[in-house]
Structures are given as C-alpha cells and as structure tokens.
C-alpha cells in the first residue's frame, strides 16, 4: 500500500499542498490557492499585515481538495513558509478544533509579514548589535517584537508556519528551526541559540522566544484527525521556504541554483567546514543562510528579477493607453520576447536595479550606451534581460562559483520558464552547463526533506 507525505507551503500570496509518494518520490496530487489575506491599514504607515483567519481557511480548503483516500495514508506532514514575519497567539487557545476535522484560528494576532516597514532606521540603529553574522532589518520577527503594541496579552510567537505546526500538534509552546530563527535576527547559527543576554539587556520579552529544534527534525504528532489524516501522524518542525525551494532542485553539492521569479536568487552549498563571519557584513552582496546538517547556503538574493520585466511591460502598457492603443499585458509580453529573439545581441546597456539591493539600496537603474541604432524594442528587451543576469552575476561573480567548485547551474523559476530570451542570457552568463528543472517548489522540497530524513 502506498504511503504519502503531505508537503505544505504557506507563502506570501498563496498556500500550496502536495502529496508526495514515498516509494516513487513523485508528486501524485497538488493544489494551490491564493490567500487574499493582505490587510489594508491606511492608519499605520508602511504596515504589512495579513489576516491569519484567511490564511488558515485557505490552508484547510487547499488540503481538503486533495484526494481523501490518499490523505488517509499520509505518514508525515512537513511545512515551510514565508520567513522573517511574526504571529502572536495565546497558549492553549490559539485555535478551535470543534468544526469537524479541521481547525480555525482563534486568539491570534494578525501576521506581521517580512514586508512590514514600520521599524524605521532610527529604531533599528537603537537596537543592540546582534551576536550573529546576519543583520536585523525591518520586518524581521525580533525587530517587530520590540514594538510593544503588538504584544497585548499574547504568550507565544512564531512564523505562520510555526503556528500551524503548534496547532496541529496541540503544543503550548512554539518550536522553531534555525532556518526560521535566523530570519528573525538575534540568533547565532553557530551555537543555534538566541542572543539571550543581549536581548534581556534591551528589555526584550524573552518569554516570546521559540524553542529551537534541528532543521529536518520532528515537532510532534497531530493531536486530532485532520482532513482524513489520522491523529498521531508525525509533523516536522517548520522550515524556511527558501531552503526548501533549493532542496527541491539541487541534486548535487556541486550545483548552483539560479531562480528567477518575481525576484532572483543565485545560491550554492558551502563546504562542510565553513563557518560564517562573526558579525554582519552589511555591504556584502552575499549572505549565508543555514541549510541542513550544519551546512550553509551562500546566497546572492536580488530584489530585481522578473518584477523588472513586469514593470517594463506595465510602463509600455500605460504609454499605449495614453496613446489610445491598448494591448493586453500578456500579448505585449509575447511580442517583446519575439522582438528580442530576432535581436541576438545588443550594445545597449541596462542596469535594472529599479528597486535597489539590500546591500546597496540607493543604487537605482540606469540605461547607458544609447545610440540611434539600438532603440528598437528588440534591443531594449534583449538588453533588459541581459541586465538582469549582469546584476545577479555582479552580486555573485562567475569566478566565485568556479572557485567554489560549482560545475552546473540549475535554472528554475516562472520568469525563466516563460522567457526564452532570459534563458539565452543565462547560458551566455555562465561557463558551466545550464539545466532547467521544474520551478523550485517549497512544498515539494519540504516533503523531500521528510522523505530523506524520517
């Protein structure tokens, strides 16, 4: 009889559920739904919150759409989700299981997401220096907790995926892996411990810090039947969506994964003996994220990826409307790609950093080397795609990959999947061979982690 792992990813805009067959290591069923959970808060500048009830309702609907006869044979559940953010709830009353075999959120705050911008530079500069190689930014859990109005009488805090694990297992506390803890700040990934003394000295409410457990380990067992999944089913401690997405498509230690979707990331696994620097490297374009088995990922995470191309299309669409010549975004996108395919190279240079970068937020976009002969849509689109690759390889140079022993580039992401010009520029940018996999998938990745480790 076949058995399955249920992999769940609670993303910023959607929830995805997959059933992963343990013997064949194949996805046999999948479903994804948008959460539509963003809360518009005009009274608080730069607030980015989401409705917890809607997220959990979407999760229940998503799992409920999977085949119930297969759900009855799920032998473990894994969760990943959006990192950095924080949710508060009350121990023992954080959800309601009375509605048949699924729970609803109760006695929780809204989710304050990684996009929240309320922690000003003044507040951040007033915080103590963390004992960590990772810096603290607005939207990070520990920075958000320093805002007293969020606390009220809540007793537990975690990411949204940590909350779901706690509710599935009936835990009175939050358990958190180093992957999510590192994304909160004030966490030392070498010792796998919170900066207790530093936070205590700053008046931080230490009782809200989750208990740390290993990445890839179990958090507990389901306390109730859930959509046909029997009570007592093992549940993995929640993981980071980025790490799980990499796990889903990195098949060898000598692979580097290039993902270009809304944003862009280039990453590879560091050697087993690598130790991160002792303090944040604020101007470095490369960060080191905790992975599995005490390994780290070297990550160049660009804010500028497919969103740059989408902005270009939106700009042209707006211009056309002003000229009373409307064309849908999808049709325009296809025509631009066709023009660029007919233009094999361009001497036009586009630096597409319209959103800046975390390590250099004030470096915005530029267009240079403009001439009368390179202003066609083919030239501009080709140069824009080339610029996206130039930017990510400036953050993590090809020589750096070669020195690290990277022998292959694994390309994934929605922007790469739909844009042949972008794929051509990827193959020009790297001397290593490039292979394309299905899109990096955190829900699949977390199921693979449990399949390999339990």
Image: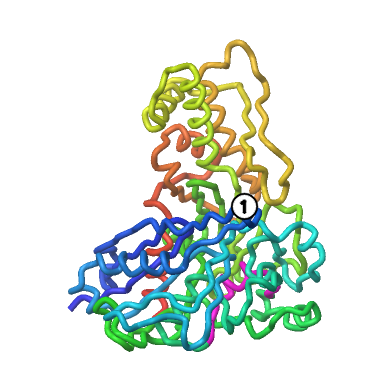
Q: Point out the image quarter for the C terminus.
A: bottom left
Q: Residue furthest front?
A: 43
Secondary structure of the residue carrying numbered label 1: strand
Identify the residue at image location x=60%, y=82%.
153
The answer to whether residue 14 is left or right of residue 128 is left
The residue beneath circle 1 is 300
Identify the residue at image location x=44%, y=25%.
336
Question: Does 38 appear in magenta?
Answer: no
Q: Point out the image quarter for the N terminus.
A: bottom left
Q: Residue furthest top?
A: 372
In the image, is residue 442 above or below residue 370? below
The answer to whether residue 198 is left or right of residue 315 is right
| Magenta stretch bounds | 173-187
The answer to whether residue 450 is left or right of residue 39 is left
- Residue 225: quarter of image: bottom left
Bin the neighbour count of mark 1 within 10 Å (Cα to Cα): few under 14, some 14-19, many 20 and up.
many
The answer to whether residue 121 is left or right of residue 178 is right
Query: In the depicted view, which residue is nearer to us: 245 or 118?
Result: 118
Tell me which colouring the rendered structure shows: rainbow
Identify the residue at image location x=52%, y=52%.
407
In the image, is residue 98 above or below residue 29? below
Query: How many numbered markers are drawn?
Result: 1
- Residue 41: quarter of image: bottom right
In the image, is residue 166 above or below residue 373? below
- Where residue 49 sits: x, y (%)? 55, 61
In the image, is residue 337 above or below residue 109? above
- Where residue 125 sits: x, y (%)? 81, 62
- Where residue 244 sits: x, y (%)? 47, 64
Query: In the depicted view, which residue is nearer to us: 413 or 176?
Result: 176
- Where residue 188 sits: x, y (%)? 69, 75
């Amino acid at each position: 009889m076949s058995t399955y792992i249920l992999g769940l990813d609670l993303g910023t805009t959607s929830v995805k559920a997959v059933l992963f067959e343990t013997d064949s290591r194949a996805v046999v069923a999948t479903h994804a739904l948008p959460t539509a959970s963003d809360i518009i808060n005009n009274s608080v500048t730069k607030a980015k919150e989401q409705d917890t009830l809607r997220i959990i309702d979407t999760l229940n609907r998503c799992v409920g759409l999977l085949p119930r006869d297969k759900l009855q044979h799920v032998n473990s559940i894994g969760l990943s989700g959006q990192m950095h953010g924080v949710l508060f709830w009350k121990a023992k009353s954080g959800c309601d299981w009375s509605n048949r075999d699924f729970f609803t959120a109760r006695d929780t705050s809204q989710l304050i997401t990684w996009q929240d911008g309320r922690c000003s530079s003044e507040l951040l500069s007033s915080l103590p220096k963390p004992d960590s190689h990772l810096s603290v930014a607005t939207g990070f859990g520990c920075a958000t907790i320093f805002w007293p109005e969020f606390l009220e009488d809540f007793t537990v805090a975690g990411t949204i995926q940590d909350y779901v694990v706690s509710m599935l297992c009936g835990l009175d506390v939050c358990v958190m892996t180093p992957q999510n803890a590192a994304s909160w700040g004030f966490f030392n990934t070498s010792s796998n411990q919170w900066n207790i003394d530093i936070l205590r000295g700053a008046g931080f409410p230490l009782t809200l810090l989750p208990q740390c457990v290993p990445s890839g380990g179990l958090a507990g067992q389901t306390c109730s039947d859930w959509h046909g999944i029997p009570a007592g089913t093992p549940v993995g401690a929640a993981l980071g969506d980025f790490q799980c997405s990499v796990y889903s498509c990195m098949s060898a230690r000598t692979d580097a994964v290039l993902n270009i979707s809304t944003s862009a990331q280039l990453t590879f696994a560091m050697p087993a003996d690598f130790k991160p620097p002792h303090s944040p490297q604020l101007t470095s374009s490369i960060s080191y994220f905790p992975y599995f088995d005490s390994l780290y990922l070297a990550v160049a995470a660009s804010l500028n990826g497919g969103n740059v191309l989408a902005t270009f299309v939106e700009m042209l669409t707006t211009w056309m409307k002003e000229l009373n010549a409307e064309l849908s975004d999808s049709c325009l996108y296809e025509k631009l790609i066709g023009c660029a395919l007919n233009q094999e190279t361009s001497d036009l240079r586009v630096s597409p950093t319209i959103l800046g970068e975390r390590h250099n937020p004030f470096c915005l976009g530029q267009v240079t080397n403009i001439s009368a002969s390179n202003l066609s849509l083919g030239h501009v689109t080709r140069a824009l795609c080339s610029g996206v690759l130039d930017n990510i390889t400036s953050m993590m140079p090809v020589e750096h990959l070669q020195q690290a022993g990277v022998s292959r580039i694994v390309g994934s992401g929605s922007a790469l999947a739909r844009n042949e010009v972008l794929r051509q520029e990827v193959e020009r940018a790297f001397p290593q061979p490039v292979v394309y996999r299905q899109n990096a998938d955190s829900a699949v990745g977390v199921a693979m982690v449990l399949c390999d480790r339990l």
